[in-house]
Amino acid sequence: MTYFASTRPKLGLSTLRPCQQEAFWAVGDYFAKGGRNAACVMSVGAGKTALGIAVALGMAERRALFVTPGNVIRGTFARALDANEPKNVLYGLPSGPLIPGCPPPRTRVLDRDSGAIRSLTREDLLETEIILTNFHSLGMGTDPDDLLSKLRPDDIDLVVVDEAHIAAADSYKRLFAHFAGAKTLLMSACFARVDGKPIEADVVYRYRLLDSIVDGHAKNLRVVRFAPDPVQAIYEIRYADGLVEEVKGRDAVLELIDEGKLSRIVARSTEPIRQMMRTVRRLLDEQRALLHPVRPRVLFSALGERHSEQIAEIANEHGIATDRVHHSMTESRIAGILKRFESDAGDLDAVVQLKMLGQGYDLPAITIVCAFRPYGSFGEFYQFIGRGIRAIQHPALLDRVPSHRQRLDVCFHSDLGLDEHIATLYAENDMDPAGVQHVPSDSWTQPVVDARAAEPGTADTAGRPEMFVVFEPGSTIERVVYNEQRVETQAAERRRHALMQRYQHYAQTQANPMSFEEFVRVAEVLFRD
């Protein structure tokens, strides 16, 4: 008997949310009727990760393959399948374990960059029940290091694809063609593709963002839009040969997105950033007062590396402890920064990201998202704001600040041309546009600054003047690195990890185990006694 055959009768579907149960049965009914390519359109925060794992446990026969578009989402699924993680899907759901009385599935997490695939044989892969990877590792099927060259078509009978709005890409087409006999489940919050290519799948279940808000799974949205005077933000690109190209306004910036120039783009006038940062600081103070003891976080998006440096520096000047992450960093450095950002005991209020955390990243404590870049498609914009849409389920907030009182502040500058995407968000989810908050333009008082005026001895040169980013001196912020609260919070996190290790053994041996939270409460009582 296979692992899935022995686990399926014990699957605790009652621990899933109603929308997840409805989606599970919709997928099951579709497969039972002979369907092969199912799609679930589910709001950010509705729980697609748990749904995908439940479908694999309930509908796979021999082996399931999970494919994600990037390392971040792959990490989300890896944590969800790791029985030692306190918030894993197998045993750590709020309502109790998903597979009571059962061991966890043997899982392989593969990443081409880590070199793990090269050292693995087909036999190694066949020893697992679930294989988790990203589309970069699939390859063409011609290189020995490609995953598609190691697995035969009948080795996988279920393929689960997250963020499937990019599923028409060639890599996914090769995936579906290679495992042509496998059932497929495509999941996404938005199936709108920027390239207009069709996605070949049958939508069997749809769960809108409005539904998620009503059911208490998502925060309410508040849109904070800054409308400046007619003067547009000015950017510049500095080349290695000394050439400086000026870029003015949203349309010109949009043209550069796919031209590889954004890593060199910076804002010549920092006043638009400073204006938005003053607003973010005010909103962050409001969120702190509302959500205490939960520490609210901010997620920024930037155009490129130098632009992210500007945003991080200005945020720190405004008392918002900020760092940045981008693809040129090492994996270990990115992990270290995200740990400081994600941990309740961490010291970062905000992170500036470059198209890294825009989809599949999950941190309910994010209560403010601030876009400092335009988005060419609604889907990409929706994925970005969705990083903070999930409601905070902290025990200290459930009575005082339930989900319907929580909000996600979506901040953006009107020059970025995001109004159309906001309108689409309202239309797609039946939201009232009257809820938009406009930041008064009266406070836009400082003109666009050309740094040459402040640089003595700088001369104009034959129609190609040098331009510099304006950085205003920042104030020194004193902060205790390891205060008492951070130390106690870190200790509490370590206790929960240790308890989860004990709980997974308990849950595997009991037909009707209590939930992890109940287990923690009992353990705390026994510890006090």
Image (cartoon, grey):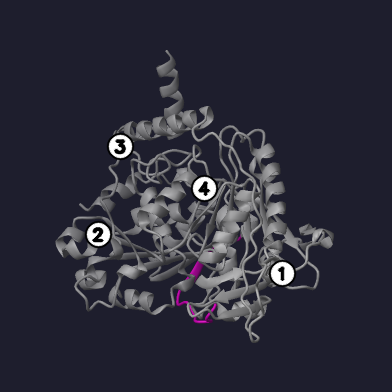
**Which is nearer the N-term, disc 3 or disc 4?**
4
Whether residue 247 is visible here, answered yes or no, is: yes
Residue at label 1? 453
**Which is nearer the N-term, disc 2 or disc 1?**
2
How many numbered markers are drawn?
A: 4
Q: Amino acid at mark 1?
A: Ala
Disc 1, disc 3: CB below 8 Å?
no
Residue at label 2? 62
Q: Amino acid at mark 2?
A: Arg
Q: Nearer the viewer, mark 1 or mark 3?
A: 1
Disc 4, disc 2: CB below 8 Å?
no
**Which is nearer the N-term, disc 4 or disc 2?**
4
**Marks 2/3: CA distance?**
21 Å
Q: Element under label 2?
A: loop
Mark identifier at residue 354: none
Residue drawn at 45 percent across, 42 percent down: 93
Mark identifier at residue 508: 3
**Marks 3/4: CA distance?**
22 Å
Left or right of 510, for residue 350 = right
**Marks 2/1: CA distance?**
70 Å
| Viewer-side residue, 263 vs 152 | 263
| Viewer-side residue, 108 vs 304 | 304
Write down the region rendered in magenta: 194-208
Residue drawn at 53 percent across, 76 percent down: 193
Relative image position of residue 235 (x, y in whole percent): 63, 73
Residue at label 4? 17
Disc 4, disc 1: CB below 8 Å?
no
Q: Amino acid at mark 4?
A: Arg
Furthest residue toward right: 442
The kind of secondary structure the magenta stretch mainly shows is loop
Relative image position of residue 246 (x, y in whole percent): 63, 79
Q: Element under label 1?
A: helix
